[in-house]
Image: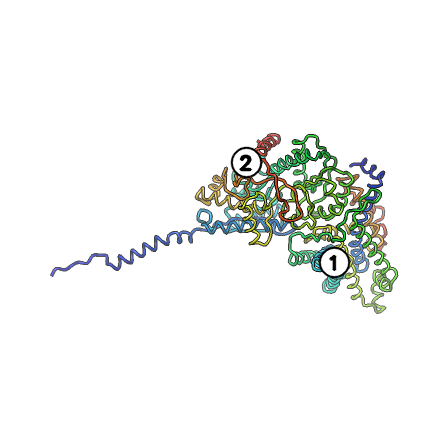
Amino acid sequence: MDLASLVSCFGSSACLVTQVTSGLIIGMLLFLVAAGLTLIFGVLKVINFTHGAFYMLGAYFAFSIFKATDSYVIAMFGAAVATAVVGLIFERLFMSRVYGRNMLMQLLVCYGFILIFDDVVKIIWGAEFRSMGMPAIFQVPPLFIAGGVVPPFYLFLVSMTTVIGVTLWLVIERTRFGKIVRAAAHNPSMLSVLGINTGVLYGLVFGLGGLLAGFAGALAAPVRSLTPGMGFSILIESFIVTVIGGMGSIVGAFIGSLLIGLIRTFGTVGFPLFTDGLMYLFMVMVLIARPTGLFGKEIA
Amino acid sequence: MATYRRSGISRRAVVEGAAATAIGILAAPMISRAQAKPIKIGMPTILSGRVAQLGTSSRNAVMLEVDKVNATGGLAGRPIEMVIRDSKGQPQEAARVARELINSDGCELLIDAEASSGAFAVHEVARDLKILCLHTNSETSSLTADPKQRIPNAFRVCRQGIHDSIVGGAYSANVANAKKLTKWMTCSPDYAYGRDTTAQFVEYLKHFKSDVEVVSEAWPKLFQPDYTEVLTKILQTKPQALYSCLWGGDLTSFIEQGNIYALFTQTETFAVNMADYTALTVVKNLPKGIHSGNRYIKTFPKTAQNASWADAYRAKYNEYPTNWVWQNATAVNFLSAAARKANSADGTKLADALRGLTIDSPFGSNGKLTLRADDQTLIDYAVGWGTTIPTEPYVPDVTPGDWRQIIELETEWKKKNNYT
């Protein structure tokens, strides 16, 4: 424990700027993955354990597209769309068969596909780790804001995730599709009775989750090493975020992600040997105070 | 009329007999070679998971050398047959696989190509079944330094943590003296290897430069994907120098992420595992001037033999050799030399021959490698530190470690740890 460093950090604008922006960077990337996870759970009532694999696929797709086109924009959007298509196909062919089944069956199907996706990545891209490298446009010195260090790529990353997050919120809250999705989360039987094809809707929601995970993978690819199984670690943290925010709540996922990001960055300063522990401790405290998470709703 | 009695042996019989004898004499080695039972060597290693690349490169290296040994008659006339199995990097699986290789597959020798955690498990199998075992990838010093671990039938044919730490400490102290670096920070993976290696490095850095102060430490998890919080902590601490024993994908992520914070222009960085092709060739923007210990690079030792060995490996497998490659190739070379010396492939006789054996090798500091008799471990291998450049040869010049100094300080270290 290094409380003196933590106190000193709060008293320094340079430290505050650096740690807060770092918290945003970690949090916003987590949010993209957690938002897809919580969206799928909210509508389909399935805990999609393969979601980390979608993040991995997004990163690998971006790696290949960037290599082929040398354009990071094409790589990012291409990877997100390709992952969405994989998500859609996966849902239609496999996940749709286990809706309503017991959780163990769903878990086994998801776990099986985690291994399959990892092996597919090994076959296509190899078992060794890969690195996409930083696009040339971002190979510039970091910015110094109030003495704090902020890399331009991370500014881009936070901006992109903010735009994606706001768009997602608008789609869910302000569009007809969003209303149908919310209705499906509330009462899918009634939706069917009203003539909505819930099968197609479920596929689209899964695809949307894949799109978000694909974006997250593509945004992470320039700074993280790509390796089969890379989705696992982010999956764990995303679950913590969704549990803290409340299962099924996108706003909760957003707040939870930011809180985890800040806990990690300030925890490293004040509690260097207990940073992970802090995250779990916070989750336990939230669950004791609000068993449904910060923004979760009691299931009637 | 006198009859002339024909002798009992006809001319035809003599010719036939002579021919048969000649064929017998000429064919004898071939028949005996054909009858020589192949010697099976078991090899548990990591062929799946995050570090599978190292395991597959170990397998490649062994096969490259085994082919050469078999082409010249095998081990004392017995062709080598490798039986290579995946341990998935799990110690209990490594032990199970090793036991199975001996009991079920009939392997008579073991090349243990496990990382440290698995190596200790395989070591216990070798102790139990009394089979000759060559550890090729475990760098944990206690495996051979600790007398409680030592068994007559196990040898370490790879680099060792304490040797690297002494050389790293001496080299870094020289740089620190020249550049007046006293304020240091460490950033290493949070598991046994990271903690032990960092502690040993700092110990020898301070041994050679007593005014060094380690002002902060960061311990990211093994396989951590994001180093943002670690990097910002380093930036806040503003150390003059940074030591890290991150490796593989973790190191490349750290370098890529450190680059965007311009970390390596602000801090003199000592990354012991940087000079390995698995990292050098993957990092897209390799910074100039990172100090690193050699793992395996074809420019050190700077000899034609080393360069041509690396080229041959690359030509056959279309990949650069890893650190595990030279070690596993060396194990086969030692077995071959021991079999020649003992004129036998028997495990006990091979062990006797291996003890204190010196061989010619492209990986030796002076063209030779020795398996030191008293603790059955490899010495005189090429060990040194240099600095990176962004393109091949990546680490053009390496300052070699002084083996006299290494052994002197290692002896002191052993005394201090009651390893004598």
Q: Is residue B81 left or right of residue B219?
A: left
For this orientation, the residue located farthest to the bottom is: A195
In this view of the protein, can residue B287 be seen by the observer? yes
In the shown orientation, is residue A205 left or right of residue B352? right
In the image, residue A181 above or below residue A129: below
Residue A101 visible in the snapshot: no
The secondary structure type at the circle numbered 2 is loop
For disc 1, the neighbor class at 10 Å (few under 14, some 14 to 19, many from 20) is: some
**Residue A222 x, y percent position in the rendering:** 73, 52
Amino acid type indicated by mark 2: Asp
Expressed as whole percent of the image width and height from the top left, the position of residue A111 reads: 70, 56
Amino acid at the residue labelled 1? Ser
Which part of the image, by quadrant, shows the N terminus of chain A?
Answer: top right
Q: Are marks 1 and 2 on the same chain?
A: no
**Which of the 4 image quadrants contains residue A120?**
bottom right
* Quarter of the view holding residue B300: top right
Visual colour scheme: rainbow
Residue closest to the eye, B29 or B92: B29
Identify the residue at the far left of this view. B1
Q: Position of residue A125 (x, y in %)?
A: 66, 57
A40, B223: nearer the viewer: B223
Chain letter of disc 2 in the image: B
Q: Which element type, helix, strand or loop, lies under badge 1?
A: loop
Q: Nearer the viewer, residue B384 or B31?
A: B384
Q: If the image is split into quadrants, where does the C terminus of chain A sit?
A: bottom right
Tag 1, which chain? A
Q: Which residue is mark 1?
A: A71
Q: Quadrant of residue B143?
A: top right
Question: In the displayed structure, would residue A130 be above or below residue A99?
Answer: above
1 or 2: mark nearer the eye: 1
Name the residue beneath numbered marker 2. Answer: B375
Left or right of B176, for residue B60: left
